[in-house]
Image (cartoon, rainbow, N blue to C red):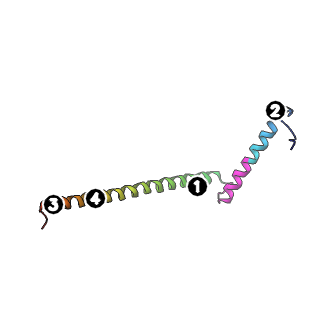
Amino acid sequence: MEHWCTWDDDPTGGLATRRLRQTLRREAVLKTLALLGFDLDNKPEMRADMAHLRRRRKSVDQAGSFGLKAVVTIACTGVAGAIWLGINAMLGKVN
């Protein structure tokens, strides 16, 4: 398949191709954001939406971390309690 233009024979040095790729990327990003429900005409609101999403993601990640720590703490406390009861039972101190 022949290309209409190569880097060597392009009089703009590939500038037209780069601009076309940049335009296509920009249109793809804008279309994706529009499909996700972002208001592309109101940039401050869109920035606020992005900031809110970032804060939400960070809080969910932090909550997951705290939840995991709580589960590990409860499990360790249960194991320590079982060991303590076992030692007391072996020594005959449990009624």
At horizontal 68% and vertical 59% (from top left) the residue drawn is: 35
- Magenta segment boundaries in residue numbering: 25-41
Which quadrant is home to the C terminus?
bottom left
Q: Nearer the viewer, residue 57 or 75?
A: 75
Do the CB atoms of the residues marked 1 and 3 lie less than 8 Å apart?
no
Name the amino acid type tagged 3: Met
Q: CA distance from mark 2 to mark 1?
A: 40 Å
What residue sits right under mark 3 in the picture? Answer: 90
The residues tagged by marks 3 and 4 sit, at their Cα atoms, a distance apart of 16 Å
**Helix, strand or loop for disc 2:** loop
**Mark number displayed over residue 13:** 2
Badge 4 amino acid: Val
| Sequence-wise first label, 2 or 3 | 2
Foreground: 69 or 28? 69
Residue shown at 74%/50% (left/top)?
27
44 on left or right of 8: left
Secondary element type, mark 1: helix
